[in-house]
């Protein structure tokens, strides 16, 4: 049901003229593809020391998410340095 409502919302948005054509769309697609490639390129190795308790908790969380714990750690670091991870304390 949500899909149908989402489709309706998109259609109404288009009809209101809220969508604009992207000039040079091929160039923009290539630009964003390169951003994505650069984001996921892993070309450096880092070694860190963390407490055993933290590592166990990271590994548990990774199992819950269904991803390797190194991937989880890299994702958290990436979100932090890109400003998308916020401290909620």
Image: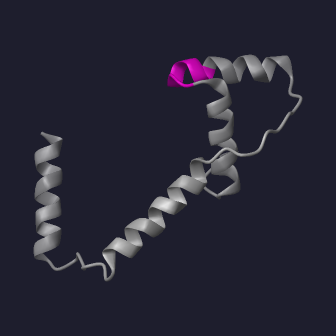
Count of marks placed on residues: 0
Q: Is residue 12 left or right of residue 37?
A: left
Query: In this rendering, does residue 80 appear at all?
Result: yes
Q: Is residue 65 magenta?
A: yes
Image vertical order of residue 77 relative to residue 15, above or below: above
Task: Give the quadrant of residue 11.
Answer: bottom left
Q: Main secondary structure of the magenta part?
A: helix
Query: Residue 84 versus residue 89: which sits nearer the camera?
Result: 84
Image vertical order of residue 9 relative to residue 4, above or below: below
- The part of the chain drawn in magenta is 61-67
Q: Is residue 9 magenta?
A: no
Q: Is residue 71 left or right of residue 81?
A: left
* Residue drawn where x is 53% and y is 61% of the image: 35
- Coloration mode: one colour
Q: Is residue 64 left or right of residue 9?
A: right
Image vertical order of residue 35 relative to residue 64, above or below: below
Q: Is residue 83 left or right of residue 5?
A: right
* Residue drawn where x is 51% and y is 25% of the image: 65
x and y percent of residue 64 in the render? 53, 20
Q: Residue furthest right?
A: 49
Query: Residue 81 versus residue 42: which sits nearer the camera?
Result: 42
Task: Give the quadrant of residue 10.
Answer: bottom left
Quadrant that contains the N terminus:
top left
x and y percent of residue 56 in the render? 73, 16
Query: In this rendering, does residue 86 appear at all?
Result: no
Q: Residue furthest bottom?
A: 23
x and y percent of residue 20 in the render? 25, 79
Task: Give the quadrant of residue 69.
Answer: top right
Quadrant that contains the C terminus:
top right
Image vertical order of residue 14 relative to residue 5, above or below: below
* Residue drawn where x is 54% and y is 53% of the image: 37
């Amino acid at each position: 049901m949500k899909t149908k409502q989402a489709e309706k919302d998109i259609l109404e948005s288009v009809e209101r003229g809220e969508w604009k054509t992207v000039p040079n769309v091929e160039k923009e697609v290539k630009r964003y593809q390169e951003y994505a490639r650069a984001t996921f390129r892993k070309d450096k190795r880092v070694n860190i020391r963390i407490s055993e308790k933290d590592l166990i908790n990271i590994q548990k969380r990774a199992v819950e998410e269904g991803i390797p714990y190194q991937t989880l750690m890299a994702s958290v670091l990436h979100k932090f340095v890109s400003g998308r991870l916020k401290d909620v304390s």
